[in-house]
Image: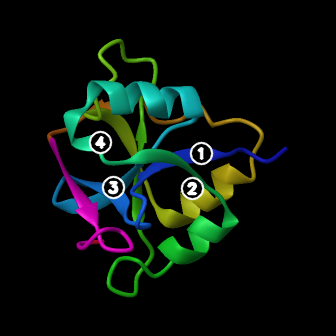
């Protein structure tokens, strides 16, 4: 079964990205409802809407970071405050693999890291 994730995208096609640990990462959420909840609770997302990170989006993101694949931040949707600070880093290959998986592995716990948001050119400028 295919697993669909959601990122935040502007009407012009730019993807929202966070700086996490010195690297730009596209935050992804497991559900559309979780993406809307995160948008409502994070002021920096007001100009963005949830968008599926599907095969077409993965093709775009494969070269979004100056010719390299984008990196991702899997947001913890269970966190009551719905902030973007709780999550887990994912590489491009990991997300592409998970998108085809029927469930997420229970491996690494979610982390809390300092994050700052930005829009990225096709990843609205930086990624």
**Which is more toward the observer, 5 or 89?**
5
Marks 4 & 1, CB-CB < 8 Å contact: no
Residue on which disc 3 sits = 16
Q: Are marks 3 and 2 in contact (CB under 8 Å)?
A: no
Locate residue 21, reporting x and y percent.
18, 53
The answer to which quarter of the image holds residue 113 is top left
Q: Nearer the viewer, mark 4 or mark 1?
A: 4
Sequence-earlier tag: 2 or 1: 1
Which disc number belongs to residue 100?
none
Cα–Cα span, label 3 and label 1? 14 Å
Query: Do the residues bearing badges 4 and 2 touch, measured as CB atoms within 8 Å?
Result: no
Magenta segment includes 117? yes
> What residue did someone put label 2 on?
95
Seen in the image, is 100 located left or right of residue 41? Answer: right
Q: Which mark's residue is nearer the viewer, 3 or 2?
A: 3
Residue interval drawn in magenta: 115-126
Q: Nearer the viewer, residue 44 or 21?
A: 44
- Alpha carbon separation for disc pair 4 and 1: 17 Å
């Amino acid at each position: 079964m295919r697993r669909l994730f959601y990122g935040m995208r502007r009407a012009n096609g730019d993807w929202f990205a966070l700086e996490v640990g010195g690297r730009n990462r596209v935050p992804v959420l497991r559900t559309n409802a979780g993406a809307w909840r995160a948008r409502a609770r994070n002021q920096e997302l007001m100009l963005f809407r949830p968008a599926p990170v599907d095969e077409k989006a993965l093709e775009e993101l494969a070269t979004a970071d100056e010719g390299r694949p984008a990196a991702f931040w899997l947001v913890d949707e269970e966190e009551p405050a719905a902030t973007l600070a709780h999550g887990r880093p994912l590489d491009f290959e990991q997300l592409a693999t998970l998108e085809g998986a029927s469930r997420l592995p229970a491996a690494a716990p979610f982390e809390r890291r300092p994050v700052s948001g930005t829009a990225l050119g096709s990843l609205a400028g930086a990624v």
